[in-house]
Amino acid sequence: MKKKQKIDLLERTLVLIKPDGVERRLVGEIISRFERAGLRIVGLGIVKPTKELIDRHYPKNRAWIENLGYNTIKTAEEAKLKIDLQKDYGVKNVYELGLKVRQWLIDFMSSGPVVKIALEGPMAVSVVRKLVGKTTPYLAEPGTIRGDYSIDSPLLANLEKRPIKNLIHASGNLKEAKYELKLWFKKSELL
Ligand code: GDP
């Protein structure tokens, strides 16, 4: 390599053990999965987040919100359930439906303690996502944390007007990880 390139050889990423994971006493088990894989804990804490913090945590862009709405409609269609946006959810369009799901997330994530973990390692963002597994518990592979310890379906969650219970949040990419680490940890709290 001739020119000096700035490469992140060690990445940092954020994991949150959601209120369902804390309630089910899975904190130790979940942390040990990351440690066993060789990731290093560089920040750790337990907090009861405010709604404002969760609102800043989840994306506000239209595409992400509409996607939540589309998925909710798709789930109902796949189950041959007719949904009436106005009657069932009190909304007019897919964007407003996505906002509803986002609000369920805000309410749930601020309903109890959350464990925040900053992890470091080579390719930490994708390694953590791999260990966590797919968003939908019944589709998450055995051997992943969600696959081994959670069972829920989007259909049930949507009917109960709550987010899918899947134990963990993990940053989706390096940009998200940088934003989220700054949001959840003060500089002095990170090694
Ligand atoms: P993640 O990165 O795997 O957590 O997934 P997303 O960023 O797509 O969604 C954020 C969270 O919203 C998920 O972890 C679920 O708890 C919840 N969620 C995602 N999709 C749906 C859905 O279709 N219905 C409901 N009720 N909750 C959802």
Image (spheres, grey):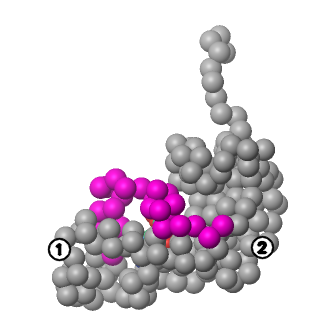
Does residue 121 show up?
A: no
What residue is shown at x 59% (from left), y 46% (from top)? 182
The quadrant where residue 171 appears: bottom right
Q: Quadrant of residue 71?
A: bottom left
Q: How many marks?
A: 2
| Whole-number angstrom distance, CA of label 2 to CA of label 1 | 42 Å
* Label annotation for residue 92: 1
Query: Magenta segment range?
Result: 47-72
Horizontally, residue 86 falls left or right of residue 74, namely: left
For image coordinates 65% across by 15% down, the residue present is 4
Q: Position of residue 73 (x, y in %)?
A: 28, 76
Task: Where is residue 166? Give x, y as percent.
Answer: 57, 75
- Residue 183, image x, y percentages: 57, 51
Q: Earlier in the sequence, mark 2 or mark 1?
A: 2
Q: How would you classify the magenta stretch by its main secondary structure?
A: helix
Q: Is residue 65 magenta?
A: yes
User: Is residue 176 at all visible to an observer of this figure?
Assistant: yes
Q: Is residue 105 above or below residue 118?
A: below
Q: Is residue 75 above or below residue 56?
A: below
As rendered, which of 114 and 34 lies closer to the eye? 114
User: Residue 108 at what x, y percent from top left?
Assistant: 50, 77
Q: Is residue 70 magenta?
A: yes
Q: Secondary structure at mark 1?
A: loop
Residue 69, numbered circle? none
In this rendering, position of residue 34 left or right of residue 186: right
The three-letter code of the residue at mark 1 reads Lys
Residue that numbered label 2 is attached to: 29
